[in-house]
Image (cartoon, rainbow, N blue to C red):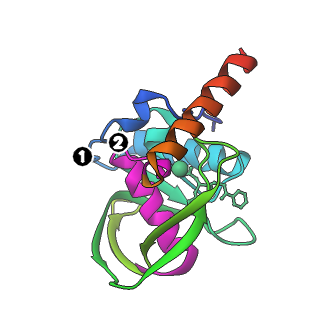
Amino acid sequence: MAVLSILRYPDPRLHRVAEPVREVDESIRQLVRDMAETMYEAPGIGLAATQVDVHLRVVVIDVSESKNELQVFINPEIVASSVECKTYEEGCLSVPGIYDDVERPERVTVKALDQHGQAFTLEADGLLAVCIQHEIDHLNGRVFVQYLSRLKQGRIKTKMLKAERSAA
Ligand code: K1U
Ligand code: ZN
């Protein structure tokens, strides 16, 4: 297994739209293992392949307290969303140190494949629903700061670029 490096906003590669996985083979299972290790090490509660510069539709999530309930979503698709919305203060491993409110549907139904290529459907609410939507946005090239005002996006970009320069 390997801890992969995570792209940081405003890296343009975060805006690439990921391709569907054609076949869930050993290379995809290895990617899932590496992504899980990267997410646990960060630490985070989710990770999309886009964030590790792999532009395939693969997501890992673990919202459990004990951090031993890994969920894998390959080619995830939201097939239903509630009309009711909820606001949650989101964070992102690609935008470290930035947290802000995002409003999203409160419940979603997601269809996906697991790491064995088996199709499943899941109804999610609470933090899992927030996280699934945040990670699918990553696969579609969208970072959560894009829900914020232009002014906030500009300030976040400047802060991230300054941090990048002082780390170099
Ligand atoms: O996609 C990512 O960047 C991961 C992100 C997921 C997420 C968090 C909150 C709302 C929506 C999506 C994170 O995991 S940020 C880190 C974080 O939330 C966390 C870290 C340690 C313990 C608990 C939470
Ligand atoms: Zn994120």
Name the spot of residue 31 as percent of width and height, x first.
49, 41
User: What residue did someone put label 1 on?
Assistant: 22
**Relative to 40, 16 lies left or right:** left
- Secondary structure beneath disc 2? loop
Q: Is residue 42 magenta?
A: no
Q: How many marks?
A: 2
Find residue 165 and name its label.
Answer: none
* Residue nearest the viewer, comparing 130 with 2: 130
Q: Are marks 1 and 2 in contact (CB under 8 Å)?
A: no
- Tell me if 118 is positioned left or right of 130 in this view: left
How packed mark 1 is, by other alpha carbons closer than 10 Å (few <14, some 14-19, many 20 or more), is few
Toward the viewer: 112 or 53? Answer: 53
Residue at figure coordinates x 27%, y 42% from the top left: 19
- Locate the C terminus and report the quarter of the image it occupies: top right
Q: Quadrant of the N terminus?
A: top right
For the record, the magenta segment spans: 119-146
Q: Given the image, on which type of amino acid does mark 1 rest? A: Arg
Q: Position of residue 79 (x, y in %)?
A: 26, 73
Which residue has dot 2 on it? 56
Kind of residue at disc 2: Leu
Measured as percent of width and height from the top left, residue 90 is found at 59, 60
* SS majority, magenta: helix
**Residue displayed at 58% across by 38% down:** 155
Spatial distance from mark 1 to mark 2, Cα to Cα? 9 Å
**Residue drawn at x 65%, y 36% as measured from the top left:** 3
